[in-house]
Amino acid sequence: MAKDPVEANELPAEERIKGFQEAVRGYSQEEAISEASRCLQCKNPACITGCPVNIDIKKFIWQLSKHNYAGAYFTIRLMNNFPSICGRVCPAEYQCRKACVLNKNKSSYASFEAINIHFLERFIGDYGMRNNLEPKVEKHPKFSGLKVAVVGSGPAGLCCAGELAREGIKVTVFESLQSCGGVLGYGIPSFRLPRDILAAEINYLSKLGVEFRTNFLVGKTITLKELFAQGFNKIFLGLGAGVPGFLGIHGENFCNIYSANEFLTRINLMSADKFPRYHTPVNIGAHVLVIGGGNTALDAARCAVRLQKINALRPDVQIVYRRTEAELPARRFEIKHAQEEGVRFKFLTQPQEFLGDEDGFVQKLKCLNCQLGDADASGRKRPVAIKDSDFELDCDLAVVAIGLEANQILTGLTPDLVTDKYKDIIVNPENMETSLKNVFAGGDIVGGEGTVIEALGMAKKAARAMIDNS
Ligand code: FAD
Ligand code: SF4
């Protein structure tokens, strides 16, 4: 008889919302082995094609099932530099798990039966980290004089830096924020990605000789031309998509209306949850609205619940979304967690206008009901506002989480760097080189908002091209 999938341990929701400790506790060794033993070791493993970087999933699961944890770790590391991170944040249900032959739901995302590949990857990644397993460093003398500048320390920048440093190339990472990690540090909350995992990855890169220069905005502080003049032979741009989109509706400038980026940065990077011990508060209120339906909106809503709880308020957080639950772009896993933690969803609702008090603080959000119309260019059904259906929602803090755009500071100051209509950098997909010779790019600044694993895939390709042509 087929075995049931092994679910990973989770903290109960009422415990989770008391703070920012990790919500999902992962597998024990026995649970990992048991889940690995469900894998059919398919002749044509569809899971591998479902993975954006084609990890040999079948092989690593086999090694794991035979207790060869180190072997499984190195199988994953061939394609993915950060298994502990990706095992926690990869939207596996839309990728490898969706493709798994055991998935009974062939339409949009993986069903319960698909192998929990992400939890197995996490188990192996954590094993590798605990046991200081690292791929061989082969510093080639021919690279000893080579210097590469990596701009941006998100997953793309960190991955590129690691690939180059392991070959003996001298790498300096320039980061405009005060600490490294990009979205992994300022965006994804620690209840999904504990910060010691990110710190361990950055620490490993430092040990490899990578130099990190924070509070350094390339473009303003130094131009690309000046970097070359300072002796850098090649440059990698991992600038991300850090500019928040806004609704453009009346009243959006009232106090206590945040972009998701600012809200999450205040909490994740500047410890707003520990105010007044740290000096960056979030003026959390009794009625919080988060507008949007992606991972960013879910992260903001779950942070808001925790801040309310920490401030002895009864959690009252609603996600306002123009379509229905079926169209929510966020991970199913995160939607379930948010619901368990008390986040409510107001579907088929279109924001019209924020209303405020005489001191300029937001009080209400005026909305219209919607219905779904024909599919739009993305294939999702278009929300159509229903005339005269307006109503108001109480709101003393709002977070706008409706998408992110390219950060244009550097590209705007580098006219020869060719971008597309969205201001994303155009690259040669074969080697990730931009219109400027010896300047490469990858991650969200190429092709727009994506995923961590996609950023890693692009960075690896760029690093390989830099190494091969040096
Ligand atoms: P980023 O992570 O954005 O890093 C870019 C870095 O470059 C930043 O640190 C920025 O400060 C720096 N920078 C920019 N310009 C300059 C400059 N001129 N000089 C110096 N430094 C500069 N993906 C998933 O796979 N799973 C998830 O669960 C998930 N959740 C997410 C939740 C949130 C809240 C957000 C915002 C995104 C999420 N994503 C998720 C998407 C994922 O995080 C991104 O696809 C990924 O981080 C992109 O990596 P990157 O290195 O290209 O850019
Ligand atoms: Fe195992 Fe599923 Fe991959 Fe088949 S498709 S090898 S069952 S993980």
Image (cartoon, rainbow, N blue to C red):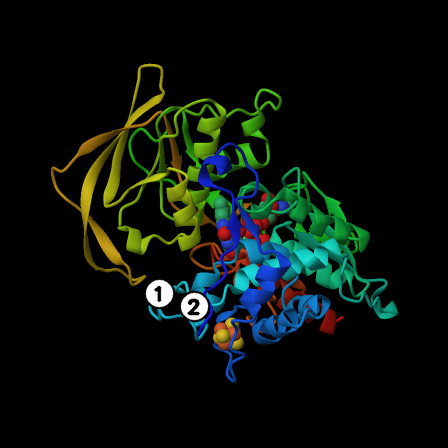
Disc 1 target residue: 108
Q: Amino acid at mark 1?
A: Ser
**Can you say which quadrant of the picture contains the N terminus?**
bottom left
Seen at 26% across and 50% down, the residue is 323
Q: Give neighbour class at mark 2: few <14, some 14-19, many 20+ (Cα, 10 Å).
A: many
Disc 2 target residue: 98
Q: Is residue 235 visible?
A: no
Q: Are marks 1 and 2 in contact (CB under 8 Å)?
A: yes
Q: Give neighbour class at mark 1: few <14, some 14-19, many 20+ (Cα, 10 Å).
A: few
* SS category of the residue bearing label 1: loop
Q: In the displayed structure, does residue 398 sit left or right of residue 467?
A: left
**Quadrant housing residue 313:** top left
Q: Residue furthest right?
A: 141
In x, y percent, where is residue 134?
76, 62
| Residue 42 to residue 15: above or below | below
Seen at 57% across and 58% down, the residue is 87
Q: Residue furthest top?
A: 358
Q: In the displayed structure, does residue 134 sit left or right of residue 41?
A: right
* SS category of the residue bearing label 2: helix
Q: Could you say which is closer to the camera, residue 239 or residue 343? A: 343
